[in-house]
Image (cartoon, rainbow, N blue to C red):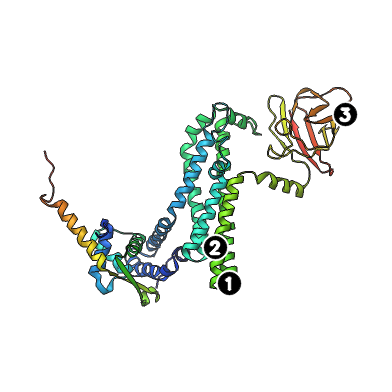
């Protein structure tokens, strides 16, 4: 006797509530074997089976897909269309609004899909099927949205200082449209990876609860686990919503502490200038013990400064150092901190266009970060 | 006053009435397809049956399976008195809104 596709059967099993699983899958199997295969052949009968499973999936989870696409569209519109100053219209709104509309909200929805899918099907596989399905469909719709809006959105973006600055900071010499296109492709790939990882993480948590923790507990324990999980999930969503992107800097600090060296991020040089960012997400001041610039080719030190006193302070929002072709001040004040030049002994040092330099920065634990640049 | 039924709900309920003791998922699907003269998604019928059961218009009972479905159980449906009343109301409404009109309708020139 012919059998429908195994994966489709697995998805159907993961999708249906416990009391409907056997009867509904039996109905589909009977129709598949008795009517579809004899009438149209196995291949088209398989397609029919997939269509039925897809339809049942959409009936159960369409509202999650619609919510996720809505969040993405609203976020994209606010990110694209900005005030003439380049500021976002979301600036100044409560953090929760920003967090819900940002990719954090999208990941939260994948978590919600997992919880709802697990609960609806009464098994952890239901959570996986829901989260992976929502992620895959939303990702495809994001790609379609991106393609449909690329031209009109790019026209609006190339007149806004925020996007012009972002374009000028990119390392390559691309046209604005070309840069926007590849920026969009990169964002889409990142979104796909994030959604896939979120699905696997949330699905894994559901699997752990469903396979390990719940079977160990009695009926009362299971009810308690269910309630506690729901409360924890709600608490997590509220905490993420309230804190928004704030957990990112501490995460970066943790990464920085693990990998070593002060944070260092260079803008692309343009118009004979380059900006070195030494802060953490423009929020946390760095721990700087020494900065040195030397010529890459000869190793000759061009500039070498140490701070006094050793403080962590924000300056120039929060710690952005601009280096220009031509004379630069050798010693400078960064808020309450004074950076005094060891090299050179003159009040200024000069950088020249076309020369490759090595920028090095040490923290108080003598960990160093390096970046090469050419003005 | 019985619940107002949509046309698809009426088709599913009438299929159960016609099939009597043999009204299980796949048989209902076939009957609805024959009556509506179009391919109908199994999920649509399933969702309608679940809704009708929630509304208290039908009742279901799990019965034995058959070899063609690898012995998987069948869910048999019966229309309750409330469901029959809803069907009668729907028919009355239908007849009332058509009363006095000749069929098929002709466009005025």
Compared to residue A24, the image places residue A263 above or below, namely above
Alpha carbons under labels 2 and 1: distance apart: 14 Å
Q: Mark 3 points at which residue?
A: A343
Q: In this view, does B104 lie to the left or right of A160?
A: left
Q: Where does residue A283 sit, x and y in percent of width and height?
A: 69, 38
Give the CA separation, mark 3 to mark 2.
65 Å
Count residues near mark 3 (Cα–Cα under 10 Å), then give few for <14, some for 14-19, many for 20+.
Answer: some
Q: Which quadrant would residue A165 be assigned to in this image?
A: top right
**Quick one: quadrant of the N terminus of chain B?**
bottom left
| Residue located at (52% from left, 59% from top) | A115
Of tags 3 and 2, the one toward the viewer is: 2
Instruction: Decide: is B106 above or below A128.
Output: above
List x then y, in percent, for residue A189: 57, 46
The chain identifier of the residue carrying mark 2 reads A
Confirm whether circles 2 and 1 share one chain.
Answer: yes
A177 with respect to A373 (left or right): left
Most extreme residue toward the front, as rendered?
A: B1
Q: Could you tell which of marks 3 and 2 lies nearer the N-terminus?
A: 2
Q: Which numbered circle lies on residue B16?
A: none
Mark 1 chain: A
Question: In what element is the residue under mark 1?
Answer: loop
Report helix, strand or loop for mark 2: helix
Which chain letter goes with mark 3? A
Q: Name the residue under label 2.
A: A227
At mark 3, the secondary structure is strand
Tell me how far mark 3 sits from mark 1, CA to CA: 69 Å
Q: In this view, does A249 lie above or below A169?
A: below
């Amino acid at each position: 006797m012919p059998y429908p596709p195994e994966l489709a059967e697995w998805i159907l099993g993961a999708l249906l509530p416990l009391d409907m699983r056997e009867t509904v899958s039996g109905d589909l199997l009977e129709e598949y074997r008795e009517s579809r295969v004899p009438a149209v052949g196995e291949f088209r009968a398989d397609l029919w089976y997939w269509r039925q499973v897809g339809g049942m999936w959409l009936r159960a989870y369409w509202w999650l897909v619609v919510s996720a696409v809505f969040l993405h569209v609203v976020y994209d519109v606010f990110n694209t269309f900005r005030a003439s100053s380049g500021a976002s219209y979301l600036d100044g709104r409560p953090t929760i609004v920003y967090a819900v509309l940002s990719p954090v909200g999208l990941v939260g929805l994948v978590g919600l899909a997992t919880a709802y899918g697990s609960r609806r099907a009464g098994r952890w596989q239901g959570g996986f099927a829901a989260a992976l399905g929502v992620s895959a469909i939303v990702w495809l719709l994001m790609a379609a949205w991106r393609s449909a809006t690329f031209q009109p959105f790019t026209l609006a973006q190339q007149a806004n200082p925020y996007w012009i600055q972002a374009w000028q900071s990119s390392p390559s010499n691309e046209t604005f449209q070309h840069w926007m296109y590849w920026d969009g492709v990169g964002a889409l790939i990142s979104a796909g990876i994030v959604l896939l990882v979120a699905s696997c993480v949330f699905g894994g948590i559901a699997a752990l609860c469903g396979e390990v923790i719940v079977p160990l507990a009695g009926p009362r324990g299971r009810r308690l686990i269910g309630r506690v999980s729901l409360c924890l999930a709600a608490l997590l969503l509220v905490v993420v919503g309230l804190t928004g992107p704030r957990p990112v800097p501490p995460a970066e600090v943790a990464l920085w502490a693990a990998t070593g060296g002060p944070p260092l991020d260079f803008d692309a040089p343009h118009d004979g200038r380059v900006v070195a960012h030494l802060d953490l997400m423009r929020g946390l001041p760095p721990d700087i013990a020494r900065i040195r610039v030397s010529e890459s080719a000869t190793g000759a030190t061009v500039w070498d400064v140490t701070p006094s006193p050793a403080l962590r302070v924000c300056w120039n929002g929060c710690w952005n150092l601009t280096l220009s072709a031509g004379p630069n001040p050798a010693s400078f004040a960064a808020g309450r901190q004074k950076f005094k030049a060891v090299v050179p002994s003159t009040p200024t040092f000069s950088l020249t266009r076309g020369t490759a330099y090595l920028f090095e920065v040490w923290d108080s634990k003598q960990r160093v970060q390096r970046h090469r640049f050419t003005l | 006053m019985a619940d107002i039924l949509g046309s698809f709900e009426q088709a599913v309920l009438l299929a159960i009435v016609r099939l009597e003791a043999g009204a299980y998922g796949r048989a209902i699907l076939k009957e609805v397809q024959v009556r509506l003269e179009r391919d109908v998604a199994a999920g649509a019928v399933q969702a309608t049956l679940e809704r009708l059961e929630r509304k208290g218009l039908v009742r279901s009972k799990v019965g034995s399976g058959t070899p063609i479905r690898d012995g998987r159980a069948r869910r048999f449906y019966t229309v309750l008195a409330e469901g029959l009343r809803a069907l009668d109301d729907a028919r009355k409404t239908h007849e009332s809104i058509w009363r006095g009109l000749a069929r098929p309708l002709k466009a005025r020139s």
